[in-house]
Amino acid sequence: PVYYEGERVGAVELVFSAERYRTQLRSLLHSQIASTAVTAVLAVVGTFVLLRIFLRRPFVELESAMNAMARGESGAHLERARHRELRGIFLQFNDMAARIREREDELLRSEERLRESLSEKEALLKEIHHRVKNNFQVISSLLNLQAAQIERPELRTWLQESENRIASMALMHEEVYQAANLSEVNVEGHLQRIVAQLRRTYQGVKRLPNVEISADSVFVPIDTAVPLGLLANELISNAFKHAFPNGEGGNVWISLRSEIADIEKQGWYVIVVADDGGGLPPAFEAQASDSLGLELVRALALQLRGELWVENDRGARFEVRFPHPAAKSGENTEEV
């Protein structure tokens, strides 16, 4: 009822529907949830975009700088980062790059010093070989002068043979200091020079044989080249002196080859000096011969850790087989 100044003037009736209230409340909740979800999605997307813009760029720069360093470009550098966490990473990276650049500069300076030192040592080694060669030549000249004053032919021959041996060693040192590589010697070229030296020695004394040299491309260290050159000098001079006693001339074959045994897989050098002369005496035994030349050949073959074979095959044939220098064991061998 509605009263006015104490009198009832009317009535008002209120009707309340619970179902309608629940419906309206449900609709309001759904709209609130949808709005909140949309806001959350937008916030996540916005955060992702911001992170991609502000954080991805520094990491891309860091990756690019690291790739540059991996390619050997030590000048890589990162600008100052905006974020405190990334700033520490960038500073550490720049410090690492600076240390690497300093290390590279130090290595370059060390390499330059080593190169200069190596050049000086090579010059000193060449000078040493040059002086050794000159000393050998002086000794050879003294022997030559002494031989000219000796009347006994056998004594003159002995001095001449000693002179040839010294000349062979002098040739070796001359080749070393003239070569670009001081650690190895071209054996074929050395054999050719030995033959030329022996031809000059025996020229005019007797008719010399024709000499053919067949050699593989073989380079050996000097500690192998010296005994090998002396051994070749003995065998070639022996062919010049004794293969053709009547001075009729003939042929001398010199061969040097490198071979590998199928079973042992061991590398060997084989040097052969053969002729088509009169050959060796019927009862000749190389191991029992007391001549100085063959004693030297046996000793030099032993120094090379090789073996000596001697046979008559339409002339004399001497063969020495010795292992590659790189395959030699650590056993000590007596040097001649």
Image (cartoon, rainbow, N blue to C red):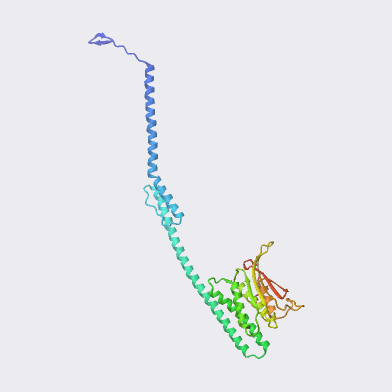
Q: Residue at x 39, y 42 (%)?
A: 52
- Quarter of image, res 224: bottom right
Q: In the picture, which quadrant includes the N terminus?
A: top left
Residue sitting nearer the eye, 213 or 19:
213
Q: Which corner quadrant holds the C terminus?
A: bottom right
Residue situated furthest left in the rendering? 5
Q: Quadrant of residue 146?
A: bottom right
Along the viewing direction, whichever of 186 and 32 lies nearer the viewer: 186
Residue sitting at x 38%, y 31%: 38
Question: Relative to 142, is 187 above or below?
Answer: above
Q: Nearest the camera: 119 or 155?
A: 155
Residue 84 placement (x, y as % from top left): 38, 48
Q: Position of residue 7 (x, y in %)?
A: 24, 8
Residue at image point 37% right, 29% down? 35
The percent position of residue 326, horizontal first and vertical second, equals 62, 66
> Among all residues in the image, which is located at the extreme right?
283
Q: How many marks?
A: 0
Please name whichever residue, 169 or 318, is drawn nearer the observer in this view of the structure.
318
Q: Is residue 86 above or below residue 41?
A: below
Q: Position of residue 170 (x, y in %)?
A: 58, 79
